[in-house]
Image: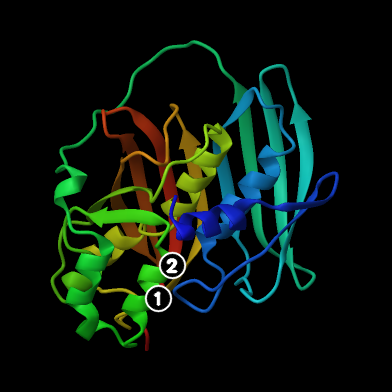
Amino acid sequence: MSPALDDLLDLLDLEQIEQNIFRGSSRSAVVPRVFGGQVAAQALVAAGRTVPADRTAHSLHSYFLRMGDPGAPIVYTVDRIRDGRSFTTRRVVAVQHGQPIFHLSASFQTYEEGLEHQAEMPAAPDPETLPTAAELLPRYADRFVDGRVVERFLEARAAVDLRYVDEPPYGTVGRPREPRSQVWFRTVGKLADDPLLHVCLATYVSDMTLLDSVLLAHGRGGWAVGDVVGASLDHAMWFHRPFRADEWLLYDQESPSASGGRGLGQARIYTQDGRLAITVIQEGVVRVPR
């Protein structure tokens, strides 16, 4: 396991300070605020630790309320909303400096057999044939407004091997194209056989690139290029089938709409053998600087 993945697992290993209260540390992301995927993953960890082990997460719905301070701890309070015969529901509020910064509702279910169908996995190249972040990012260094962006990107994503199928938004600035993006990802190292851990790591990664497709539709490069500013507003995920976050997952993303200073991204995450594992939807603020 890589040191970066060790650090990420430590970040997700919350301290329990009361029966339903947990505390997490934080760290700087690529931008000077807490990375949204970190808060969502930590909140899901907090919820999952109050749920019987035989129940796995099948959905989450969340809202980002305030910008997180990477220099302060985050306190997660869990409400045990319901424990039914098949489903368990939890609500989590993340607080910093006395104010809520994030709200999550999650549902967990015992395993059961049922009807089966799924959308087919789209075509995508073998991830091993694609450039790594360390190979890709330096190609675009001259397009970023801050010369340290490449280093900060690589540091922030060192625990995850994330590979773009096509050029990222900052690679096609000024050239609008189809609002669709694909990336392959997996953790840099093997993980324990804990379903909650794999779900939380997929949640962490899911906030990294989902709004790329919004930018592609308008030929925008993103915050690092300086032609948009933005932030996640809400985030929802449905976990359909078991998967491992330490094995290749295809993140197939698209944007059906942008309006009112907001952009919508939706995506499906597939295992390498074609099973639909996760559906993700997110809306974010996407504004053109004046």
- Label 2, residues with CA under 10 Å away: few <14, some 14-19, many ≥20: some
Image position of 202 (left or right of 64): left
Viewer-closest of 228 and 155: 155
Viewer-closest of 242 and 102: 242
Q: Which mark is residue 152?
A: 1
Residue at label 2? 156
**Residue at point 54% right, 13% down?**
112
The part of the image, by quadrant, that contains residue 162 is: bottom left
Q: Position of residue 83 (x, y in %)?
A: 76, 26
The part of the image, by quadrant, that contains residue 73 is: bottom right
Would you say the residues marked 2 and 1 are in contact, meaning their CB atoms lie under 8 Å apart?
yes
**Residue at point 64% right, 22% down?**
54
Q: Distance between the residues labelled 2 and 1?
A: 6 Å
State whether residue 284 is above or below residue 138: above
State whether residue 227 is above or below residue 257: below
Tally of numbered discs: 2
User: Which element type, helix, strand or loop, lies under badge 2?
Assistant: helix
Q: Where is residue 37 in the image (x, y as percent from the top left)?
A: 51, 57
Image position of 287 (left or right of 173): right
Q: Where is residue 275 in the image (x, y as percent from the top left)?
A: 32, 27
**Residue at point 38% right, 51% down?**
188
